[in-house]
Structures are given as structure tokens and as C-alpha cells.
Image (tube, rainbow, N blue to C red):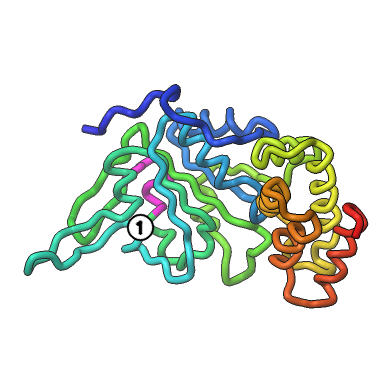
Amino acid sequence: MNAPLPSQAAIELPLYAPAGNEIELFEHAFKNRLPLLIKGPTGCGKTRFVAHMAARLGLPLHTVACHDDLTAADLVGRHLIEGGGTVWCDGPLTRAVRHGGLCYLDEVVEARKDTTVVLHPLADDRRILPIDRTGEVLEAPDDFMLVVSYNPGYQNLMKSLKPSTRQRFVALSFDFPAAEREEAILIGEADIDRDLARRLVGIGRAFRALKDRDLEEVASTRLLVYAATLIHAGLEPLAACRAALVEPLSDDPETVEALMEIVAATFGR
């Protein structure tokens, strides 16, 4: 039997500023036992949103950061040698199915293609997880939810979700927040004043206008929060922006200096 879930009042909700009806959609998906696919650029709040919703619903959160070497066994589990014998050890997906909770696969397209096949029986109306190595077939409880995310900007022919996988999910698109909402996020996360938040958001929007011309990726809301945090801690604004906003985006000296010109135009030299 699953352990009782903690009450929402006992859980501190991670700060999250909604952009639309994503909270309502997530809650409806959970109540109707539907898996959710979240699409959006790096650092736009996908992971924070999932953490917020897990806390809001009182669900344990099992997060898997997907990568090229992730195997089905990493998700489901494997036999380990112990005391001269072998014991079965559940993977994060199996733990979530066995005990309930939210299983979040972050950047799922980074995982090996054969890995996503294990999600198929969980992500349709069967809601089961067959474990070939133990002979078990686990039925997902009502308090289990599968959520996956990826960045469409990184998609190519080698890294994309098969239609047979995509069409098992309801989907939600994320993007960078509107300026006023992003300012509110910086104020709440880094405890800065509105004028500084407005300047940093202006820099972020200027950097994003360079997407696909001078930058492969642009300043995420996460990086803006980092810059705001450094400035709040006492670091000079140009130094903070260089460390948190500029250097992470490019290794090219000319591009770095061009981005610093935008920063200097905002804060002065």
C-alpha cells in the first residue's frame, strides 16, 4: 500500500509564475491519468513548473536527467550483486510506478531511442510497466503521472520523438516569459528592485533577438536569475552580467565583446 501523501499545506511550493492555463491543464491531465509532454527552450521554466506541480499536488517527484547513455535499465532497474548473490534494484521509473508519484524525464530526446519504448505501455490506456527481468507487470496507481520534456530547438533527424511516442501524450508548449512576468520572476527569485529587473530583462530580450544570427542559444530566464543573484550579492553589474549572461553563451571573443556592448549600453561602463 502506498504511503499517505503529505498535505499541500505541509509542502512549500517552489516559486512559479503562470503564463496561461498550464496549471489547470496539468491538474486535469493528472486527474484523468494522462501523460504530459512539455516543449520549450532551455531555461524557460519547464523543470521549475514540474517541481511546482508535484508540490502542489502533494506528489513525490522522481526526476531523471536524460542523456546519450541512458538505458532502459537505468529507468526500470537492474540486478545488483550483493552478499554473494544478486538483488533487484528498482530504477526511478519503477519506483514511481510501484509507489506512486510524478516521474519526470527531463530532455527525453537525449536518451537512446530504444529507451523511450519502455514508456509506451505506461503512456497509453494500459498504464502498465512490464519488467522483463523479474517477470512483473506493474499497474500504475491513480497517483502516478508521467511527464517528459524536451527542447525543440535541439531537435534534428537523429534526436526527435517518434510519432508513436509523441501521440501518447497531451502536450504543452513553453516559451520565455513576457517582459512583465519575467521581471516579476527576477524580483521574486533574487530579491532585486523593479528597475534592476527591468534592465536585466531588457538585456535578455536583446540577446534573444540575436538567435540564429550570432548565437545558437540565448539568455534563458535561469541565466537572468543568476545575474540578478550575483548583483544582489554585491557584484558589480557588468561583471555579473559577463559571468552569468555572456560567457555561458559564447566562446567567441568577438561575440562576447558584442554582447558586452549591449550590457554596457544598459548599465554604463
| Residue at (84% x, 39% y) in the render | 195
| Quarter of the figure that contains the C terminus | bottom right
**Badge 1: few (under 14), some or many (20 or more) residues near its Cα, within 10 Å?**
many
* Residue 248 in which image quadrant: bottom right
Horizontal and vertical percent position of residue 98: 27, 43
Horizontal and vertical percent position of residue 218: 75, 60
Asked whether residue 130 is in view, the answer is yes
| Residue at (43% x, 71% y) in the render | 69
Which residue is nearer to you in this view: 84 or 226?
226
Q: Amino acid at mark 1?
A: Leu
Placement of 170 over or under 262, stated as above or below: above
Q: Which residue is mark 1?
A: 75
Horizontal and vertical percent position of residue 230: 68, 52
Which residue is nearer to you in this view: 35 or 264?
264
Which residue is nearer to you in this view: 106 or 161?
106
Horizontal and vertical percent position of residue 168: 49, 47
Q: Is residue 121 magenta?
A: yes
